[in-house]
Image (cartoon, grey):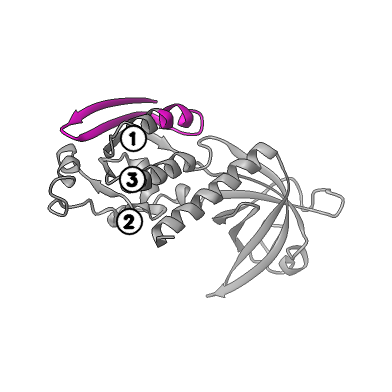
């Protein structure tokens, strides 16, 4: 990632180009922290060319805004890229940051606060991949770890991610089709304690990575509407690569931090 700096009076404008993630966060956060220490507390971040930002980097932006506010300044964002814009909206951070369309509007915020129209980010369509609504492949295992119902995975949709597990939705097929797991044998095979193996992506945690884990079903809820059975399955990881687990734990912690900031905790 590259960061370009320029001054407009007492306002410091930083333009970011590239990806802001765990690999370059220490380098660029150090540079920004040095700016703040030397009195630059009126910050405008131009994110038009920021192609990716992970939860850790967003958490840093939240903390930076809080820091400059304590010193009588603020941090505003202008022209966020499509990815960043959707991330801010999905995580509710568009209510925490002032976000504007142009550089001039960002600078004017510090001199004529309230006279500039903010972007209507509520109208941005959420990106399901950021929110967590991406696919999860799961297979059933017996007590000894042997695979049940053949090698082909079943595919659900993640609805929530937690530090130690997740929740996903799965439309249960009716009997008589190709699926070996149906409404007829679902209760027998999917229940608390059932061992699973899962594989899924979460681009907001790691851009291109697949997470894989052994897991156990913790709770199952079913809803039947117009003859369609949808199951909500809560699982807890029982075995996962430690580095992967740390990424998911950090993501959950970042989400808790965002929620706390938005509530004013």
* Residue segment shown in magenta: 1-30
Residue drawn where x is 26% and y is 47% of the image? 99
Quarter of the picture holding the C terminus: bottom left
* In the depicted structure, whether residue 169 falls above or below residue 106: below
Mark count:
3
Q: Tag 1, which secondary structure?
A: helix
Label 1 crowd (10 A; few <14 / some 14-19 / many >=20): some
| Residue under label 1 | 36
Separation (CA) of disc 2 from disc 3: 12 Å
Of pointers 3 and 1, the one earlier in the residue sequence: 1
Image marks 3 and 1: residues in contact by CB distance under 8 Å: no
Quarter of the picture holding the N terminus: top left
Q: Position of residue 24 (x, y in %)?
A: 47, 28
* In the depicted structure, whether residue 101 falls above or below residue 182: above
Name of the residue lying farthest toward the right: 144
Separation (CA) of disc 3 from disc 1: 25 Å
Q: Nearer the viewer, mark 2 or mark 1?
A: 1
Q: Nearer the viewer, mark 3 or mark 1?
A: 1
Label 3 crowd (10 A; few <14 / some 14-19 / many >=20): many
* Residue 60 on the magenta segment: no
Task: Specify whether 25 is left or right of 152.
Answer: left
Q: Position of residue 251 (x, y in %)?
A: 54, 46
Image marks 2 and 1: residues in contact by CB distance under 8 Å: no
Of pointers 2 and 1, the one earlier in the residue sequence: 1
Of pointers 2 and 3, the one earlier in the residue sequence: 3
Query: Quadrant location of residue 199?
Result: top right
Q: Please tell me which residue lies in front, 163 or 186.
A: 163
| Residue under label 3 | 85
Tag shown at residue 26 = none
């Amino acid at each position: 990632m590259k960061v370009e700096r320029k001054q407009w009076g007492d306002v410091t404008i930083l333009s970011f180009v590239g990806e802001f993630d765990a690999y370059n966060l220490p380098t660029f956060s150090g540079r920004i922290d040095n700016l703040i220490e030397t009195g630059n507390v009126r910050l405008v971040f131009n994110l038009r060319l920021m192609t990716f930002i992970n939860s850790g980097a967003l958490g840093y932006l939240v903390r930076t805004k809080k820091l400059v506010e304590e010193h009588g300044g603020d941090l505003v964002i202008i022209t966020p890229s499509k990815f960043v814009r959707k991330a801010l909206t999905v995580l509710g951070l568009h209510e925490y940051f002032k976000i504007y369309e142009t550089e001039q509007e960002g600078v004017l915020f510090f001199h004529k606060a309230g006279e500039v129209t903010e972007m209507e980010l509520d109208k941005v369509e959420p990106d399901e991949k950021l929110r967590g609504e991406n696919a999860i492949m799961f297979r059933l295992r017996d007590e000894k770890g042997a695979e049940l119902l053949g090698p082909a995975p079943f595919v659900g949709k993640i609805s929530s991610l937690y530090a130690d597990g997740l929740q996903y939705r799965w439309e249960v097929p009716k009997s008589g089709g190709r699926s070996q797991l149906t409404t007829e044998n679902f209760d027998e095979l999917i229940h608390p304690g059932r061992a699973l193996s899962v594989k899924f992506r979460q681009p907001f945690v790691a851009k291109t990575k697949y997470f894989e884990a052994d897991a156990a079903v913790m709770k199952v809820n079913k809803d039947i509407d117009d003859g369609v059975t949808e199951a909500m399955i809560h699982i807890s990881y029982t075995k996962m690569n430690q580095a992967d687990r740390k990424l998911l734990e950090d993501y959950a912690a970042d989400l808790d931090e965002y929620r706390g900031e938005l509530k004013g905790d």
